[in-house]
Image: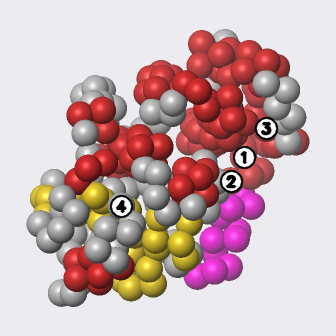
Amino acid sequence: MYVKKSQTGGGGYTAFIDADDEIPKDALKALYEATEEGKYDIVIGQSPNAYIQPKVYTAEEYRRAYFAKSGMGKALWGRLISKRLLNDEVFDLPREIVKGEDLLMNIRLAFANTKQVKVISDVVYHYQPVPQSLVNTFKPSLDYEKLFYKHLLRSIPLSVQEEYMHSLISARIGAIWLIAMLNNRNLRKEHPYIQELRHDIEKHDYHLSLREYILLCCPPWFLVQCMNVWKMIIEKIYKKQL
């Protein structure tokens, strides 16, 4: 990962750039000017691969956006981050976390930040997909999700974890849904990750949607049938769009 630093005032800002990607000529200039000389500690631009609504977000809106479906983007690229937010805790991740580490770092930065966050309309980053990259070849599993959730929870201050628990439960169910879509016959509902999730659902009075109920509560044979139907629907929608 290549790091480009701006040393102009306020301790400077840092931009993260993957080696295979590109940035427009004036991208860093546009991002830095949007910081308004230190008014914002985080400024985010656009990428053709991921649109984020341009506006000024409160610190709390920015945090919660990472747990919403629209999101703020999981990657560290395409933004300027004040160097004062980058401490050892942000980078303290085990080597076993091979996917999603950017998201964990962004969440830690979001809770460390106390200022408003600005999203601009300028395109500042061009992501280049690499078919054989880890991101594109990674196979999700319940074991990995259990490990990832442990570090996700640690990324949220203990004092406010309760406020985000419903969003965390929803995100965990979404991860299980993806695993089921890819390999539903090996989805072991007795796995500790799913058992812990069920405990949290009951403890925090989380109300399951129909899809979530089918995923977590129905017999495996029924789940397999539902997943096959769902895949057929997705394939038909995709073909119509071509």
Identify residue for label 4: 41
Q: Which residue is mark 2?
A: 231
Residue 149 can be seen in this image = no
Give the mark toward the camera: 4 or 2: 4
Say few, some or many: other residues with alpha carbon within 10 Å of mark 3 (under 14 / 14 to 19 / 20 or more): some
Please give the label number shown on residue 212. Answer: 3
Q: Earlier in the sequence, mark 3 or mark 4?
A: 4
The structure's colour scheme is secondary structure
* Amino acid beneath label 2: Lys
Viewer-side residue, 69 vs 153: 153
Chain part drawn in magenta: 232-242
**Alpha carbon distance from label 4 to label 1:** 46 Å
Which mark's residue is nearer the viewer, 3 or 1?
Answer: 3
Tell me, yes or no, whether the two marked residues, 4 and 1, touch with CB atoms within 8 Å.
no
Determine whether 116 is above or below 200 in the image. Answer: below
- Determine the image quadrant of residue 185: top right
Cα gap from disc 2 to disc 3, whole angstroms: 16 Å
**Which quadrant, please, contains the N terminus?**
bottom left
Amino acid identity at mark 3: Glu
Sequence-first tag of 2 and 3? 3
Q: What secondary structure is the magenta-colored segment mainly? A: helix
Residue occupied by mark 1? 228
